[in-house]
Every structure is written in C-alpha cells, then in structure tokens.
Image (spheres, rainbow, N blue to C red):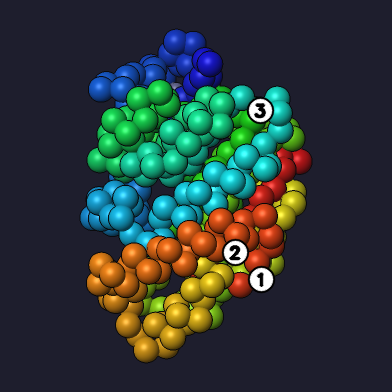
Amino acid sequence: MSLHWRCPDCGEALTPSCSCGSAPVCEAHVWRVGVPAAPTGFPQERADHLADIEHSHFWFAPRARLLTDLIQRLRRPEDQHILELGCGSGQMLHRYTELGLTSTGVDGTRSSIERAALEAPEATVIHANVEALPLSSEQFDFVAAFDVLEHVEPLPFLNEARRVARTGARLLISVPASQWLWGPLDEAAGHRCRYDRPQLEAELRQSGWKPLGHTRYQFLLFPVILASRLMRASKAERHPPKRVGTLLGAVNAAEVRLLSGRRLPWGSSLMMWAEAA
Ligand SMILES: [Zn+2]
C-alpha cells in the first residue's frame, strides 16, 4: 500500500519533493523527511527503558492483547491501513499484520523507531514528530495511539491524527486514568497529566473526533495499585520482584481473557475509541 507524503515544513505534497527541497528518505528501513527533533515530552532514557522491559513487565503483554481485541472489534471490514502514532519499539505492529491490516508506525525517538524497523520488518516505520506528520491528509482507515497523548500537546497531536485519517476512520487511544492517582510514577514517566473521561472526550471533540466508547485496564489490580500509590511504593510497582510480577501479569491476563468485551468501571488506564467526524 503506497503512502502519500507531505512536507512537515511547507505542507506541500512530496511528489517526489516539495519547493523547499524536502523528500522522504529511507535508511535501514526507517523513513524520514528531514531530521526530526527529539521529542521534548519523552526522554530518550525513558524510551530505552520501556523497550527493554516491554517483553517482561506485567503491564505490557495483557495490555497488548486487550488493545488487539479492541481493534479487532472496532475495525470495519473494509479497513486496510492502520497508523500507530508513538509506536515506540514497535511491539504492536506485527499484531496489526495478524489482523490483516497494513501498518505504518511513527515515533519521534530515533533509537525506538530503529528497533521497530527490526521488530516489524513488514511495517512501514517513520521517524517523525507525531505533532507534525510528514504524511498527506485523509489516508488511514484506523489510527492508534497508546500512552502517547499524556506526553504531547494534546490538540496539535489529535488534530494531526484526525487530518491523516479518512472520514469515518476509527481511533483507539489509551491514557493513564484518573488525575487523583497522580504521583511520583507519573512524574518519573514525564506525564503532563492523567486523564478523566470528560477531559479526554472534550479534547477528542475539539479535534474532530466523535467519542464512541471506552473501557479501563488493570481493573482487577486497581486496589493493589491504589494501595501501592498510597504507600508511595512506586519503585516496587515499577520493578516488582519477579514472582510478584508474574502473579500481577497473570491477574491482568485473566482480566483481559474474561472481561475484555465489557466496559470496566475503573482501572489505571483509560481506553477510548472515536470516529473521524
Ligand atoms: Zn517543503
């Protein structure tokens, strides 16, 4: 499936270049237009840390399964091309292929997107600023952004997501839930905020998305998380002893297996889906 490029500086179509002289280039399977600046809201060390723990931390694998189930439920039969904004090291990209979708991943952190190119050779991966995409308007059938919004300027980001989506396209987004849970873990992660549902719905509406539904993740573990935050045991939550991590992962996996078709009323992550209006 061919991608349509647009210069992030002058806004002209890149066919193959624009009047300011930019053109898409591909090095080691990573595409870029110009040299993207490193993202300000997402430090390099954080990106590398996430890429290292993604395969083992109790939060990730069940979450990936839940997000895949949600995309499978939300996608329309005619959908072909999915775009993931802030794809990190590309752990989700091969799942889109398994759903029969063509996938494109964008991330602003160079080391992450280089890993994504290795993890998902079948995907197109782009090193770019997610708030100024080098992509033409109205070309994607589905847009995904998992735990990205809380790191960026929300309206520029959601507007860009809307611009490159076709009318009627679906968006699936996840964010840390409940501002009252705000704590040292959020500060360490570089979050701007945690999200309550009305705030996320308002930002989606302001950027041309019509909210359709929502659920939560880490519903069963929520009391444990709450206790851990109240005791300020954030380090243990980030790096629990191996046996504890395995147990927590099993609880999250059971939640996704048993409850992923339901709207869960609480949990540490908020997942919301919307349609390009
Ligand atoms: Zn240009």
Q: Quadrant of ligand 1?
A: top left
Q: Residue at x 44, y 86 (%)?
A: 227
Q: Earlier in the sequence, mark 2 or mark 3?
A: 3
Image location of residue 148, percent across then percent down: 46, 52
Question: Disc 1 to disc 3, how far (Cα)?
Answer: 29 Å
Residue type marked 1: Pro
Image location of residue 263, percent across then percent down: 69, 62
Residue 187 shows up from this direction:
no
User: Dot 3: what SS?
Assistant: loop
Q: Look at the numbered discs 2 and 1 and tell me whether their residues touch, using CB distance below 8 Å.
A: yes
Q: Residue at x 25, y 72 (%)?
A: 241
Q: Which residue is mark 1?
A: 265
Q: Residue furthest bottom?
A: 231
Q: Look at the numbered discs 2 and 3 and tell me whether their residues touch, using CB distance below 8 Å.
A: no
Q: Which residue is mark 2?
A: 216
Q: Residues within 10 Å of mark 2 (few under 14, many from 20)?
A: many
* 18, above or below 69, in the image: above
Q: Between residue 22 and residue 238, name the one nearer to us.
A: 238
